[in-house]
Image (cartoon, rainbow, N blue to C red):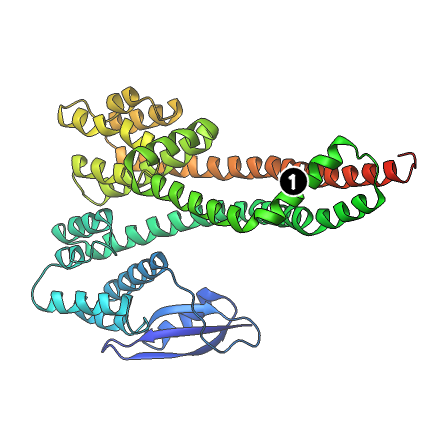
Amino acid sequence: MTLYSYRTSTRDGEIDEGFIEAADEKAAIGRLKDTGVIPLRVTAQKEGYRGKIRFRSSRADIQTFTAELSTLLNAGLPLDSGLRIIADIFEPGGMKSVVQSLQGSVREGISFSDALQKHPGIFPRLYINIIRAGESGGTLNEALEKLNEFLESERDLREHIISALIYPAILVATGGVSMIVLFIFVLPKFSVIFAELGGALPLPTRMLISVGNGLKASWWVLLPVMVMGWLSLRHYISKTTAGRYRWDSIKLRLMGGLIQKLETARFCRTLGMLLKSGVPLIRALNNAKDVIDNQVFASALDSVSKGAKEGKGIVAPLTEANVFPSLALSMIKVGEDSGQLDEMLLKVASAYEKTLRETVRRFMSLLEPVLILAMGLIIGFIVISMLIGIFSITDMPF
């Protein structure tokens, strides 16, 4: 049996928390429902765990908000009651204040989508448009379910890519620190020894000693220059349109296939979900373009909305944009011709997300040994250069 912590609500909005033992999460939820309460959260606990330690990002807050509001509305609770219950989930400040503001707006008679629109820094346009479409069709709970599925899919893909990059990042950081220690602390000590022993040193040894002495003498100048250079480059890339476009162009040339799969999956899933939720095509296209991260890719899609307005559909404009894979375009065309564009877009997204995971796995399996080899060659060159210097002074054969 596994221990689960739970958070539940009664039909009157009373919150309860505690622990329950069950064979699995589904069984725990079933036992709670049998008692007449609404399960809000059921989480498996590690052995010996009883506290509540939470690490939340704004994305995680939005996903929690969406999932639990969907659960409450499906259970038959009114929107304002659901918002009141959800406000108690979050810690004071931050998301709690946002939910309380939403509850106040809804009680004043403002629509939920208009209330969300008051917090553009929290809820993106895509989120608001799906909620608005659900409200107009009387299917707000279904819109929240679709949003929750979309957020979960996006989170899983993002976490997969981040987890794949963790090991190479640690490897590069460790190798960089090792080389800095060698150049700044180890090599200058050898230079003192070589100077005391006298004699001519081989070229590689002289080069390394010069670099080490230079770094030790001028690190206090180099470090601020590097920091300022990094901050300036970061500002140019993130704050200027030209810088962002140029950086994205470089990334597209270096990792074209990977970025193409990522942006295709992101665009198709967003557009398919919007259309399935009842958002008009032109608005859905504009929203879907906004989720594209690569500016070169996004700029190529500027003509798609115009083509759709002129009655060309979306396949012809997407083909003219020349950024999507031919297989994706063929599948979208089948969906457009059969009147099932939303379903086909979601299938394209699922297919390319699967392909992307496999591509990332293969790329990382190649990158890791390349990094290890590169770090080994650099550090090996430093060690061998020092040994050559020692052996040349002591007249020992190398």
Which SS class for mark 1? helix
On screen, residue 87 versus residue 23, left or right, reads left
Name the foreground residue: 225 vs 398: 225
Name the residue at 39% across, 34% down: 247
Q: Quadrant of the C terminus?
A: top right
In the picture as drawn, the residue positioned furthest to the left comes out as: 109
Query: How many numbered discs sit on the rendered protein?
Result: 1
Query: Can you tell which quarter of the image residue 327 is in?
Result: top left
Q: Measuring 30% from the left and 21% from the top, which residue is drawn there?
A: 319
Q: Is residue 106 left or right of residue 368?
A: left
Which residue is more in the foreground, 346 or 179? Answer: 179
Horizontal side of residue 251 vs 80, given as left or right:
right
Q: Quadrant of residue 97?
A: bottom left
Quadrant that contains the N terminus: bottom right
Extreme residue in the right direction? 396
Q: Residue at x 71, y 48 (%)?
A: 188
Looking at numbered disc 1 in the image, what kind of residue is underneath it?
A: Val
> From where the camera sits, is residue 348 visible?
no
From this viewpoint, is residue 172 visible? yes
Above or below residue 41? Residue 211 is above
| Label 1: few (<14), some (14–19) or many (≥20) C-alpha neighbours in 10 Å | some
Depth order, front residue of 234/25? 234
Indicate the position of residue 124 as horizontal and vertical percent values.
Answer: 24, 50
Task: Residue 39: give x, y in percent of width and height.
Answer: 35, 70
Q: Quadrant of residue 328?
A: top left
Can you identify the residue that label 1 sits on? 211
Q: Position of residue 111 (x, y in %)?
A: 11, 59
Q: Which x, y percent locates residue 260?
A: 40, 31
